[in-house]
């Protein structure tokens, strides 16, 4: 059975891990775009593709069109047609959706947090915000991604979720914007909790970061951080070693679906 693994740039480390498991060798990944990649890992076929970017994540992604899901963004329509030969989402294969909602960059890089803070982190000069209020922000932010899952379910497409990697300690919001690490970690934890609860309540599987990939504070361990050989520093993505662990879990899940 072949599954489609779709999502944002975090899909790249998964695709690179699959490439290495098939072809051997290693190289640093680029994180500048996702090319067509179709691999066999164990008993599972895995096809990696991109479908999202931060500006689109709050939106609806796609609409039901004559019994199929058609992406609303023309670029994704063209990419899907080029990669699969289909103009709409193939309903005969499982789809694993990676990181379209469970980590909310739009939330924790917002200027709000220069003057506001979660109640337990509010220092002098910062207005406290309750976790319930933050959860309400997340619920609103996740609406588009939830519609994507709901429409796939309506069409009978087997769907599961794949979590993004833990945040890095050198994340741009910390290294460049000056946000406190504990603020990002708290917002990220709430985002993952809200997303996990929504999926569990609907019986949807969630493949989460493997135990041991995060440090005691919840950040990605340094050995799993992607390092670019050239160009701007990568402060967001995990590397192919992390991808190896995740691809193994994804392949096991896809094999179970096909059993």
Image: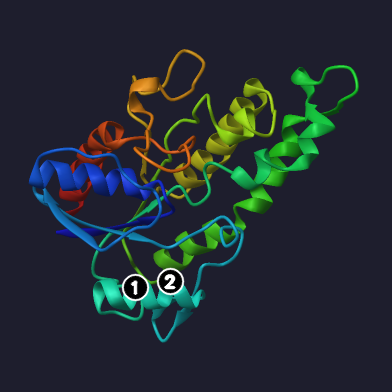
Q: Which mark is residue 76?
A: 2
Q: Residues within 10 Å of mark 1 (few under 14, many from 20)?
A: many
* 232 lies left or right of 189: left
Relative vertical location of residue 243 with respect to residue 76 in this rendering, above or below? above
The image position of residue 107, as x and y in percent, is: 67, 43
Relative vertical location of residue 141 with respect to residue 77 in this rendering, above or below? above
Quickly name the residue at label 1: 80
**Direction bottom: furthest residue:** 66
Out of 185 and 198, give the one closest to the viewer.
185
The image position of residue 206, as x and y in percent, is: 38, 42
Q: From where the camera sits, is residue 91 visible?
A: yes
Image-quadrant location for residue 191: top right
The image position of residue 24, as x and y in percent, is: 9, 40
The image position of residue 9, as x and y in percent, is: 42, 50
| Colour scheme | rainbow
> Which quarter of the image is occupied by the N terminus?
bottom left
- CB of mark 2 within 8 Å of CB of mark 1? yes
* 244 lies left or right of 203: left
**Direction right: furthest residue:** 125
Q: Secondary structure at mark 1?
A: helix
Image-quadrant location for residue 126: top right
The residue drawn where x is 38% and y is 72% is 155
Out of 257 and 230, give the one closest to the viewer.
230
């Amino acid at each position: 059975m072949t599954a489609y693994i779709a999502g944002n740039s975090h899909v790249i480390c998964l695709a690179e891990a699959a490439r290495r498991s098939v072809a051997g060798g290693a190289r640093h990944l680029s994180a500048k775009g996702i090319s067509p990649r179709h691999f066999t890992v164990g008993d599972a076929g895995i096809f990696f593709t991109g479908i999202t970017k931060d500006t689109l994540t709050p939106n609806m992604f796609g609409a039901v069109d004559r019994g199929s899901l058609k992406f609303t963004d023309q670029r994704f329509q063209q990419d899907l047609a080029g990669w699969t030969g289909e103009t709409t989402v193939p309903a005969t294969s499982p789809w694993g959706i990676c990181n379209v909602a469970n980590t909310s960059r739009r939330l924790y890089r917002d200027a709000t947090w220069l003057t506001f803070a979660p109640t337990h982190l509010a220092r002098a000069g910062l207005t406290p915000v309750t976790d319930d209020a933050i959860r309400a922000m997340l619920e609103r932010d996740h609406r588009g991604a939830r519609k994507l899952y709901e429409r796939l379910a309506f069409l009978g497409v087997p769907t599961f979720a794949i979590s993004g990697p833990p945040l890095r300690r050198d994340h741009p919001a910390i290294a460049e914007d000056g946000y406190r690490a504990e603020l990002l970690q708290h917002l990220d934890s709430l985002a993952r909790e809200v997303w996990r609860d929504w999926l569990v309540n609907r019986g949807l599987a969630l493949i989460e970061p493997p135990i041991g990939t995060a440090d005691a504070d919840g950040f990605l361990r340094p050995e799993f951080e992607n390092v670019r050989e050239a160009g701007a520093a990568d402060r967001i993505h995990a590397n192919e070693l992390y991808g190896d662990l995740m691809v193994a879990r994804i392949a096991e899940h896809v094999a179970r679906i096909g059993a």
